[in-house]
Image (tube, rainbow, N blue to C red):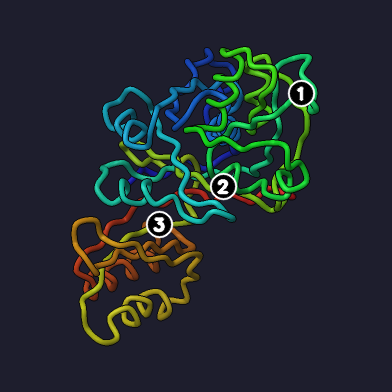
Amino acid sequence: MSPRRRSGAARRPGSPRSGTRRRPALRVAIQGERGAFSELAARALFGPRVRILPCPDFDGLFRAAESGRARYALAPVENTIAGSIHRVHDLLLHSPLKVAGEAIVRVSHALIALPGVRLTDVRRVYSHPVALAQCEKFFKSHPRLMPVATHDTAGSVRALTESGARDAAAIASDLAARLYGARVLKRHLEDHRANFTRFFLLSRDGRPLARPDKTSVLFATRHQPGALFRCMGAFALRDINLLKIESRPMVGRPWEYVFHVDFEGSDRGQSGRNALRHLEEACTFVKVLGSYPRARTPRV
């Protein structure tokens, strides 16, 4: 278990203490290119000086933190429109990384093109398939624009600037436009303004960024009547509020499932410890992903 922080005034994670030499910025691994929404989440946690290590896929993201190439890995776990990120949940099941914090970022899509390009010049729009799907109303109102799926939102902006295409645009964050010297043609393309992505901040030691008040756990039940009811009773009997419950198929084991539960409180508190002991008695498998400070959802 992680050691408790000493009491006192709160300090922004990653910021130097007063009167001491500034320490090197933390390196955080993200999936995708610089300017991705994951980088916005990293900046929300650690400020603009955070060092970003881009990774091509989620497997590489986890390896970067597991090997020590990065202090943290910042993995998206769910979006309020698209749902859970299944590959990340599968990796969490087997990875030694622990959750040290979380971030919630509002996803606001911008149409980005090269300087001097106008909206009337654009014929093709590149972005990740999920981002394209979240902007259906924009494409319906601009039927001459053809959406083209790519591997990454920010990567689409980078590819656009490298190609020099003046009949194309990309959908990504404002940050991506600034980083790659591009121009925002139109903001707020998303169909729903209440579009948020939740990220897990993962580390090898799992030391929480601040006082933990939320816990994530994975477990599997026995195949018998009332098994899930007894698991939920571990929390209900102690008046512990569940924030999320979701099931995922276990890869390679047909018709077997892992449940992901988030609950209020820490695994170091008496109620949390007792609930987890009770859960272990009722389950075939329990893995505590970590206790960490709960993130607040930004205003729309």
Where is residue 279 shown, x and y percent of the image?
A: 29, 71
**How far is disc 1 from disc 2 in space, using C-alphas?**
32 Å
Q: CA distance from mark 2 to mark 3?
A: 17 Å
Question: Which amino acid lies under the numbered mark 1 shown in the image of this protein?
Answer: Asp
Q: Determine the residue positioned at 78% across, 14% down.
A: 116
* Quarter occupied by residue 119: top right
Which residue is rendered at x = 25% and y = 60% of the image? 250
Of circles 2 and 3, the one toward us is: 2
Above-or-below relation of 44 to 195? above
Looking at the rendered structure, the secondary structure element under dot 3 is strand
Q: Is residue 232 above or below residue 69?
A: below
Residue corresponding to mark 2: 197
Label 1: which secondary element: helix
Q: Amino acid at mark 2?
A: Thr
Q: How many marks?
A: 3
Nearest the viewer among 141 and 24 is: 141
Compare residues 216 and 114 and report the one nearer the observer: 114
Q: Residues within 10 Å of mark 3 (few under 14, many from 20)?
A: many
Q: Position of residue 161 (x, y in %)?
A: 61, 15
> Residue 108, how many percent across, how many down?
68, 40
Amino acid identity at mark 3: Ser
Is 24 situated left or right of 287 in this image?
A: right
Circle 1 packing at 10 Å, graded few (<14), some (14-19), many (20+), is: few
Q: Which residue is mark 3?
A: 216
Q: Are dots 2 and 3 in contact, CB under 8 Å?
A: no
Mark linked to residue 29: none
Q: Nearer the viewer, mark 1 or mark 2?
A: 1
Which residue is disc 1 drawn over?
Answer: 121
Residue occupying image coordinates x 45% and y 36%: 74
Disc 1/disc 3 C-alpha distance (Å): 48 Å
Say what secondary structure mark 2 lies in: strand
Please give left or right for residue 169 compared with residue 197 in the image.
Answer: right
